[in-house]
Amino acid sequence: MTKRPGALWKGFLDLFEDDDPSEPAYDPVHLGAAAIGTLASLGALYWLLWTLLVFEGGLPMKVRALASVLLTSKTLRDYGYEGKPYAMGAFEGWLGNLIALGLTLLLVGALHRLYHDAAKKKVR
């Protein structure tokens, strides 16, 4: 059975009719903004974790070196420290690591608050 050419043309034109208002609408701008927002947030998360854990040895290395200095007979010089303007040794980049730690704590606190508020609303 073949359809009449008029019926095919009408079926083709039906594709371009106005959408039903009860159905969700496809908005390419919203989709693009969601994709860009997702990529930007992933980039920010990558930078935050990289600065915290990898930059100039990362914060765990600095904490381990500081604990070794405080709890054993090692000195700062054993870790290459000669003073701030000269050589920081294992403590190079500590300011970036601490800023990343602060931003990470702020982010985790904000996410916890959002989760806590949403959980309170659901209980009611």
Image: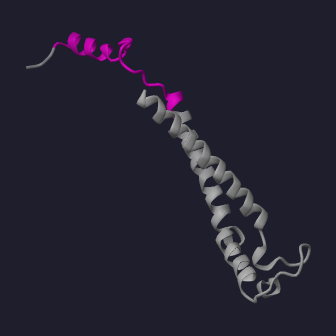
Q: Is residue 6 left or right of residue 59?
A: left
Please give the name of the residue rendered at 77% of the width and 74% of the height, measured from the top-left corner.
91
Residue 86 picture location, percent across and down: 90, 77
Q: How many marks?
A: 0
How is the model colour-coded? one colour
Q: Reply above or below: 114 against 83.
A: above
Residue 60 picture location, percent across and down: 64, 71
Please give the name of the residue rendered at 54% of the width and 43% of the height, measured from the top-left corner.
38
Residue 53 picture location, percent across and down: 63, 66
Quadrant assignment for the N terminus: top left
Q: Reply above or below: 54 against 72.
A: above
Q: Is residue 32 left or right of residue 86?
A: left
Residue 7 drawn in magenta: yes
Q: Quadrant of residue 98?
A: bottom right
Please give the name of the residue rendered at 26% of the width and 15% of the height, measured from the top-left corner.
11
Q: Quadrant of residue 95?
A: bottom right
Residue 20 drawn in magenta: yes
Q: Is residue 77 left or right of residue 109?
A: right
Q: Reply above or below: 109 against 89.
A: above
Nearer to us in this view, 36 or 3:
36
Boundaries of the magenta span: 4-31
Nearer to us in this view, 50 or 122:
122
Quadrant assignment for the C terminus: top left
Residue 80 picture location, percent across and down: 80, 84
Please give the name of the residue rendered at 83% of the width and 76% of the height, measured from the top-left corner.
88
Residue that protrudes farthest toward the right in the picture? 85
